[in-house]
Image: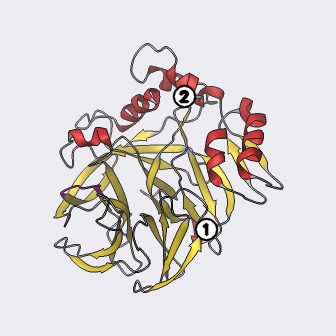
Amino acid sequence: VALAACLLGSASGLSVASSSSSSSSSAVALAACLLGSASGLSVASSSSSSSSSAGRRGARDGPGDEAFAALEELGGEAKPKSYSVRKVRTIPHEGRPWTQGLEFADDGRLVETSGDYPFGTGSFVRVVDKDTGATVQKITDGLARPMFIEGIAELGGRWFASTYEDHVALEYDENFNFVKSHSFPYEGWGLTHGPGRKSFLATNSSEFILSLDPENFSLVSVLPATCLGHTVPGLNELEFVDDFLGQGPALLGNVIETRVVLMLDPKTAKCTGAFHLQDLEAVTQDELRGSHVANGIAFSKQTGTLWVTGKNWENMFEIAIEDPGLGDLSQEDAISMLARHLESI
């Protein structure tokens, strides 16, 4: 909690929700240390003390055992559900860019951002033809090197993109004409709109989901993403869906160093389910070094499907998320994969 809060910059009236009842005082101290003068800071506790790094690295009987045991300590909360993935179609990922953001426009355009990697290639935004994978429009305005673009979201008829360590958010009009830059005092990772499109939700490499004021990107509130009794650091590309699988609002996020996509309740940041992208494109050794990792989730309102891809992936995929039903063992359990990952960090 302390380490992540330090990354957030200054904020007034900040609300921090902690996943551990025993960590409230340390969270206050940490937030005060890292946030500077943050008047009105409040810290709320929501679960057990099992989210500590010491708990993650403690002795265990086998992969996933500790995480599932911790789940039993969470006051009878339902175990998050694993969902299966059905591939609908595949298109080429033209140029195999370093995907940082993926989003559908309200009018159905598929929008992708690519960071400046390999260094020197330059960051850009592009509109992708959903039938062929071809680039329909490529935008570099406002992205002079070495600026490194990250997530992108549409809000109020405008497009907003975060940047990695440039502390700038870029604003474009509906046709991607550059409008202006905004101060963005965070490390940029994922970015999406929040409930009711009244805020932005962002990540910054920590376990925290940041709620940001859409007018000036000031920090409104913070929630730790939690699952299986652990906090979940490293949520990368984000996607907010108003009604996912008929179960209400959901925040989806790629979990870094895995091919797991986590489903979170946006009100609490607690996980409700997960699915994985393990079977879409062959896993390469580069993924151990941060290349060729899954990144990019876009929900199509027109079809109710998701589009996904990854950094340097050869393809983009339209997929349907389904309930596998009892006894369906055709795919490895995404929650078990996540449990092993959380114990390893």
> Taking 226 as reference, is 135 above or below it?
below
Report the amino acid beneath label 2.
Answer: Leu
Q: Quadrant of the N terminus?
A: top right
| Among the two numbered marks 2 and 1 on one chain, the one whose residue lies closer to the N terminus | 2
Q: Name the residue that disc number 2 marks.
A: 71
Q: Nearer the viewer, residue 294 or 198?
A: 294
Frontmost of labels 2 and 1 is 1
Look at the image and tell me whether residue 273 can be seen. yes
> Taking 108 as reference, is 308 above or below it?
above
* Residue at the image position 79 percent from the left and 48 percent from the top: 42
Q: Nearer the viewer, residue 229 or 95?
A: 95
* Residue at the image position 40 percent from the left and 76 percent from the top: 105
Residue 310 in magenta stretch: yes
Q: Name the residue that disc number 1 marks.
A: 199
> Taking 335 as reference, is 216 above or below it?
below
- The region drawn magenta spans 309-314
Q: Position of residue 49 (x, y in %)?
A: 65, 28
* Residue at the image position 62 percent from the left and 60 percent from the top: 211
Report the amino acid beneath label 1.
Answer: Ser
Q: Secondary structure at mark 2?
A: helix
Look at the image and tell me whether residue 248 can be seen. no
Q: Position of residue 286 (x, y in %)?
A: 24, 42
Q: Residues within 10 Å of mark 1 (few under 14, many from 20)?
A: some
Q: What colour scheme governs how the chains and residues are painted in the rendered image of this protein? A: secondary structure
- Distance between mark 2 and mark 1 Cα atoms: 31 Å
Q: Quadrant of residue 46?
A: top right
Q: Residues within 10 Å of mark 2 (few under 14, many from 20)?
A: many
